Image (tube, grey):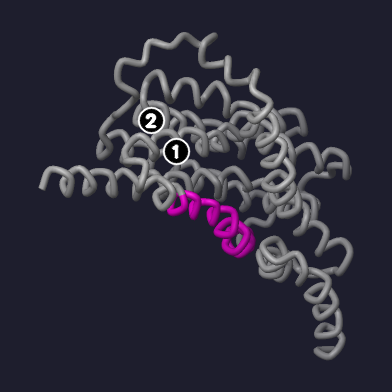
Amino acid sequence: MKNTNSLSQSHKILFLNTLAFTVCFACWTLNGVLVTFLVDNGIFHWTVIQVGWLLGIPILTGSIMRLPIGILTDKFGGKYVFSLLLILCSIPLFLLPYATSFLTFALLSFLFGMVGTSFAVGIGYTSIWYPKEWQGLALGIFGVGNAGAAITTFFAPSLLNHFSVEDPQNGWKALPVLYAIVLLVIGIAFLIFTKNKKLENDTRTVTEMLKSLKSARVWRFGAYYFLVFGCFVAYSQWLLPNFMNVYQTTLVMGAYLQPYSAYHPELSVLLAAIYPINSELEK
């Protein structure tokens, strides 16, 4: 009976963990759609190189900061680290509508890119709630939160178009505010409804935690992750501007094509070829 109650609590934590991770991942990939929209509509006149930086900065922040955030999770527990991460990352998103230059936009992108570290928090916080025989399934379910990228890709373009109907120049500002509100609400809910848990009797210092970096296996698996997941994220970020610039799709149509191509790269050539043919037939 005790084991059943324990797993019930674990499943609740897993649900909230996955929900928060989904929202974080949606915010993490926001610039892929938002920056493309701003440049395409002439709201900001950024160069291709500047666009590349704005697409890459949040991803870079969320990647390189996973190590310190993971250490904090081990030290203080996932409840407080995840809640604080969600709440604090909502601030730069609230401020994003006030960005008037590339540098301001880049700085705020750097700050809200911290939501990408949610993967490190969630993995640690999920694992500690489950026995070893459950961890594979639990972490697999948590990984579904990657779908947050697809949520942004599917819905953000339509939302941007909707917000810009009455005010084409400033309507886009509602989108980052909407994302910020969702982050804030989930952060508060996480703080209220989750229970903190961390390794018992863990007296390791930060130096001792970093000793694992001396293992060649850690670097080897890091390289695998860099090549597989890193390429996936880079590919998904650049597909939308690629579809629009090379194949002249609309923002919404490019967004519909992107997830299929990102998850099934072998379809990208076929989809890219079909769209121009359909466009010609519709004329």
Identity of the residue furthest to the left in this view: 1
Tell me if 213 is positioned left or right of 100 in this view: left
Q: Which mark is residue 179?
A: none
In front here: 213 or 278?
A: 213
Residue 194 seen in the figure: yes
Q: Position of residue 252 (x, y in %)?
A: 68, 67
Q: Position of residue 170 (x, y in %)?
A: 64, 49
What's under tag 2, amino acid-wise? Gly
For the magenta stretch, what is the residue range?
A: 140-164
Question: Label 1: how many residues lie within 10 Å, few (<14), some (14-19) or many (20+)?
Answer: many
Find out whether the residues at labels 2 and 1 contact each other: C-beta distance under 8 Å. Answer: yes
Q: Where 168 sits versus 272, above or below?
A: above
Q: Residue at x 46, y 33 (%)?
A: 121
- Circle 2: element type: helix
Q: Where 252 sits versus 167, above or below?
A: below
Tell me which numbered mark, 2 or 1, is placed earlier along the sequence: 2
Say which residue label 1 marks: 122
What's under tag 1, amino acid-wise? Gly
Quadrant into which the C terminus falls:
bottom right
Q: Residue at x 76, y 72 (%)?
A: 267
Question: Label 2: how many residues lie within 10 Å, few (<14), some (14-19) or many (20+)?
Answer: many
Say which residue label 2 marks: 78
Q: Residue at x 67, y 62 (%)?
A: 263
In front here: 98 or 56?
A: 56
